[in-house]
Image (tube, rainbow, N blue to C red):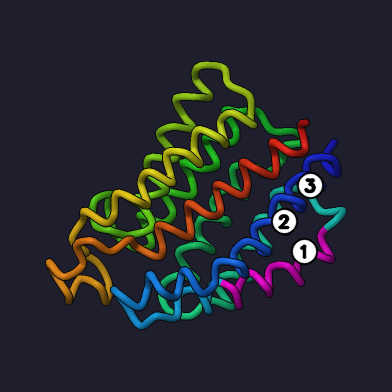
């Protein structure tokens, strides 16, 4: 059962790596309006390293896969993004520890743990125009869906939809954290690159899991 769960997770992670690469230029464009314009490059580089790391994890438990992804992101991504995304995967991996299969509730808890890790590490809150503005609504949507008895596929779909809305909503926010905060009101009208990366990751996860179940 562990190999089955790990196999599905590896397909999701590989799809994420490919989509991050495809969106490299777009993420750089978003970041150029608010930062130094290299977010897409950093994300593509880091997830390329993740893709290479996945090749040796086919027989590992899911928790070890997520831990390996987290450590790779921390070591490969420059600036604040590496530790933040890496922490998210590390915390999710802790929730998955010892589990040979995942329930919808497990998935919601993994997303919640990822958010809590990012808050603790980055000190941001929803509304600060950061990746949390895509992740927090995704966590809330996932929790509601899981509580209502939704399948893992539908929990992911709910999370992805909420994340996309959250990322788009950052256009109406003033940045309060990081380099972008120096621009103040000039950040209005621009979508946050980190939030967009979160929405891409969750969208691909939902699409890949849905494809596996059809």
Compared with 66, 162 (above or below) is above
Q: Secondary structure at mark 3?
A: helix
Tell me the residue that label 2 is attached to: 65
- Residue that sits furthest to the left in the current view: 185
Q: Are marks 3 and 1 in contact (CB under 8 Å)?
A: no
Find residue 6 and name its label.
3
* C-alpha distance separating marks 3 and 2: 8 Å
Tell me which numbered mark, 3 or 1, is placed earlier along the sequence: 3
Tell me the residue that label 1 is attached to: 54
Q: Which residue shows up at 68% across the image and 64% down it? A: 18
* Quarter in which the N terminus is drawn: top right
Magenta span: 44-57
Q: Are marks 2 and 1 in contact (CB under 8 Å)?
A: yes
- In the rendered view, does 100 fall on the left or right side of 73? right
Q: Nearer the viewer, residue 163 or 136?
A: 163
Label 3 crowd bin: few (<14), some (14–19), many (20+), radius 10 Å: many
Q: Secondary structure at mark 1?
A: helix
């Amino acid at each position: 059962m562990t190999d089955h769960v790990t196999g599905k997770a590896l397909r999701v992670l590989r799809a994420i790596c490919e989509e991050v690469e495809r969106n490299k230029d777009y993420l750089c464009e978003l970041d150029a309006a608010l930062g130094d314009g290299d977010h897409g490059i950093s994300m593509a580089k880091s997830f390329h390293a993740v893709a290479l790391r996945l090749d040796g994890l086919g027989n590992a438990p899911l928790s070890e896969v997520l831990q390996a992804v987290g450590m790779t992101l921390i070591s490969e991504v420059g600036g604040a993004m590496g530790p933040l995304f890496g922490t998210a995967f590390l915390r999710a991996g802790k929730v998955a520890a010892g589990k040979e299969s995942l329930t919808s509730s497990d998935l919601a808890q993994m997303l919640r743990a990822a958010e809590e890790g990012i808050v603790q590490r980055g000190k941001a809150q929803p509304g600060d125009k950061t990746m949390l503005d895509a992740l927090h609504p995704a966590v809330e949507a996932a929790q509601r869906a899981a509580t209502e008895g939704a399948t893992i596929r539908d929990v992911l779909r709910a999370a992805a939809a909420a994340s996309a809305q959250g990322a788009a909503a950052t256009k109406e926010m003033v940045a309060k954290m990081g380099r972008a905060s120096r621009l103040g009101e000039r950040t209005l009208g621009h979508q946050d690159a980190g939030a967009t990366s979160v929405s891409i990751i969750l969208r691909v996860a939902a699409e890949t899991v849905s494809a596996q179940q059809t």
